[in-house]
Image (cartoon, rainbow, N blue to C red):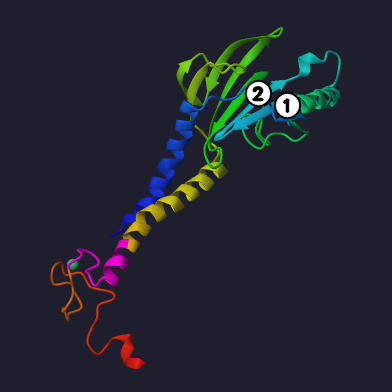
Amino acid sequence: MRRWKAAGPLGLLTTLAVAWLLAAAVPVPMYPRRVARAWLGEDGRPWSCYETGVFGVRDAWWQDVTDSYAGLTPAEVVERHSAEQAHAAGRRAVADGRIDLTSAPPSRGTLARGRAGPVEVVGSDSAFGWPRPCLWYSVRGELTGTTLVNDRLVGGVRLFGVPSSRGRDFSALPLRPIWTGLALNAAAWTALWLLLLTVPGAIRRSRRRARGLCERCAYDLAGCTGQTCPECGTAQLGFEQPGLTPDTDR
Ligand SMILES: [Zn+2]
């Protein structure tokens, strides 16, 4: 009767299984992008990022926008790019809903605060999990003019298709952890497993007790006077003993 001890391992397994199932089964959306970022990275490079998400899936397109603005300093690039994002967001807001603009770096992924920027100039981060994103991979590449080349998968296992940082004709399993997401999801799934493992048994035992049956084997205890079941030997919580029933005090 120590089934509840399995809840922790089951919670962790469920966390990973759900993240991988989402990665394998849910198409990562291309549009609409709901968050636009432009910021000066700790590496001194001007970064741009567009994010979107659906149930259990978060996706971010990022790019070093230095080459889009010839002759400007990185700080000026960020300023100019932010203005262009704001202009585009105004049009987008009319077309297909709100888009959030921010100058904060992403909280997770390739360009998360405190993480050294990649050598690549363009890429995407895809994170999966429920209730929170907890595993992610990245696709990184190069730009020749406006053409993406040499896209490669980082931190994931390809299932099918050709990984692309801007296209979605591929699927991959994420291997990189998002620790806060892993902890929160594992806690949530462990709680659910605890309920599933303990509640049905508790209800069954309580029903059997109420009907005067052994909690464990359902043997009819009518007329029994010992404190254990004569059939299976299990000690009985609500065993009726002559002279010890609560009614004698009333
Ligand atoms: Zn019994």
Give the residue type at disc 2: Tyr
Q: Quadrant of residue 107 in the image?
A: top right
- Ligand 1 within 8 Å of disc 2? The answer is no
Is residue 208 depicted above or below 66 in this figure? below
Question: Where in the figure is residue 216, as x and y percent of width and height?
Answer: 23, 64
Q: Which quadrant is the N terminus positioned in?
A: bottom left
Residues 228 and 109: in front is 228
Quarter, ligand 1: bottom left
Per the rendered image, the range of residues in magenta is 204-219
Residue hosting label 2: 31
- Is 241 magenta? The answer is no
In the image: residue 218, left or right of residue 131: left
In the image: residue 203, left or right of residue 41: left
Residue hosting label 1: 96
Question: Where in the figure is residue 162, as x and y percent of width and height?
Answer: 51, 13
Residue density around tag 1, few if under 14, some if 14–19, many if 20 or more, within 10 Å: few
Q: Are marks 1 and 2 in contact (CB under 8 Å)?
A: yes
